[in-house]
Amino acid sequence: MDLGALERDNSASRLLASAVPPVCRTQPCSLGIDEAGRGPVLGPMVYGICYCPTAQQGDLEILKVADSKTLTETQREQLFEQLNAAKDYVGWALHVLSPNFISTSMQQRAKYNLNALSHDTAIGLIQHALDLGVQVAEVFVDTVGPAEKYQEKLKRQFPGLEVTVRAKADALFPVVSAASICAKVARDRAVKNWKFVEDLEGVELDYGSGYPNDPKTKEWLAQSLDPVFGYPQFVRFSWSTAQTILESKAVPVHWDDSEDGPSPKSAQSLLSFFARKDAPTERPLHRFFHERKLETVTGL
């Protein structure tokens, strides 16, 4: 798994993928989807898919894949290396969503919540596998939001596939467990090797688990905040934990054209310069035209 591009520029999201096993282009395949890092206020969220021929799903059980949350970091790393070594029948792909992308997406004018972002990322990864020629026959997904609605959405998007969406799918289906491991290993590596482009001189890099309820994470958020420029790109500034600290410790910014409150009466809104005029305004003629008895011709 080469995270070099992400380490060089972690402000953008990245798509990583293994080579497609030739057998996956000729035989019906099962594909699992899961994510890692949905809840933390720090670092990227990673969506992962793992696929193999349906007839060889039992081989994943032999590898003893399991829900990544039940495994230690060492166990996850070992299992990922085993999955990577089984490249004659196992393939994977990962979409690493940067903290910057997550926050800017969620705070754009048109509402785009985390569930919608997750659904679109999963759909994109399924389509990515199909575009690569993987003969996907069935898809197993760990749900985000109501399972039935999510399943219907995926079936409308991919009517030719058998889709199963379940809560705790990473503990029920080996191919989802494998996707969970791939996603978690990628996130752990990205967080561990994160390169801060900001000057954090004097700020400890021990930020705890990254979850909002972790006291160590909260303390790090308060220390790393610049009162003018805000947080490093490592922080999902759209999370309520980060927003609360921003509101209490950062310099307030007032926008005259904000829709939330009225502008001072003496201040002319910037938007007024772009307002459409109901009728053209007549401008007085320059004295050059008056002295020479010149008039505007409207017809010939």
Image (spheres, rainbow, N blue to C red):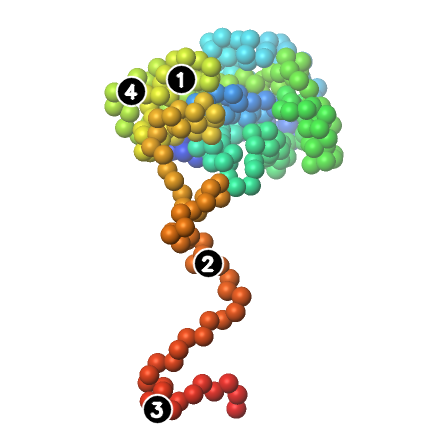
The type of residue carrying mark 2 is Phe
Return the residue found at the far left.
201
**Residue type indicated by callout 1:** Lys
Q: Earlier in the sequence, mark 3 or mark 2?
A: 2
Residue 30 lies, with reference to residue 267, above or below; the image says above
Q: CA distance from mark 3 to mark 4?
A: 75 Å
Q: Is residue 282 visible?
A: yes
- Image disc number at residue 253: none
Secondary structure type for disc 3: loop
Mark with earlier residue (2, 4): 4
Q: Nearer the viewer, residue 14 or 101?
A: 101
Q: Is residue 7 above or below residue 178?
A: below
Q: Would residue 1 be found to the left or right of residue 144 on screen?
A: left
Nearer-N-terminus badge (1/2): 1
* Residue bearing mark 1: 218
Q: Can see residue 14? A: no
Query: Marks 1 and 4, how far apart in space?
Result: 13 Å
Using the image, determine if residue 42 lies above or below residue 82.
below
Looking at the picture, which amino acid does disc 3 mark? Arg
Measure the C-alpha gap from mark 1 to mark 2. Answer: 43 Å
- Tell me what residue is drawn at x 45 percent, y 54 percent: 271
How packed is label 1: few (under 14 Cα within 10 Å), some, or many (20 or more)?
Answer: some
Q: CA distance from mark 3 to mark 2?
A: 36 Å
